[in-house]
Image (cartoon, helix red, strand yellow):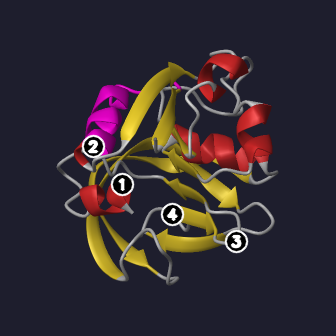
Amino acid sequence: MDAIAILDFGSQYAQLIARRVREAHVYCELFRWDTPEDQVLALPPMGFILSGGPASVYEEDAPQLPAYVLNSGLPILGICYGMQALAQAFMGHVIKALKREYGQTQIEVVTENPLIPMGEHQVWMSHGDRIEHLPSGFVTLARSKNAPVVAMGNLQHKYFGLQFHPEVHHTPIGREIIRR
């Protein structure tokens, strides 16, 4: 059975992420980010989605990306906080954004990739932090006027991060992104 493990970092949209994955005809289960490894891997997942959340990765006691996710070698999609946790886990640099982004934003896809179609797209943002420096092996997939990195990827390992929310209807290409 193909299955996706969604690790919830406190997102208000975690249930919606699961719904969108199921609408793409893929089985998934939602777990708290700190669920024991054996419970999550019992699924067994063919990949991971890391949800958003209200924390900042640089705060003391902020939720961290579990090591077993990275050690699994499976594809990873980080959404919002999940992207920031992924960047930090691979030694990227996350900073407090000069301007908090909330609402509709236009992005420009700058690198051909298997996740987001080339072109300009309307998306839904909700974040106060942003990626300042990409981790080694990652490239910028898309940018906006307020953030130089709104999507990143390590194409070789199939690790992707989105600063925007593909699961909400305010991101018209979101269902396609989740399906991919």
Q: Report whether residue 88 is seen.
A: yes
Give the residue displayed 58% in from the left and 34% down from the top. Answer: 44
Say whether disc 1 or disc 2 marks the residue closer to the N-terminus: 2
Give the Cα distance between marks 1 and 2. Answer: 7 Å
Say whether disc 1 or disc 4 marks the residue closer to the N-terminus: 4
Q: State left or right for residue 62 relative to residue 148.
A: right
Give the residue displayed 47% in from the left and 70% down from the top. Answer: 143
Q: Residue furthest front?
A: 1
Tell me if residue 82 comes above or below residue 98 in the rendering. above
Asked whether the beta carbons under mark 3 and mark 1 sit within 8 Å of each other, the answer is no
Q: Is 21 inside the magenta-drawn segment?
A: yes
What is the chief secondary structure element of the magenta stretch?
A: helix
Q: State left or right for residue 82 relative to residue 74.
A: left
Asked whether the beta carbons under mark 1 and mark 4 sit within 8 Å of each other, the answer is no
Say whether disc 2 or disc 4 marks the residue closer to the N-terminus: 2
Q: Disc 1 marks which residue?
A: 178
Mark 3: amino acid:
Gln
Q: Disc 3 marks which residue?
A: 156
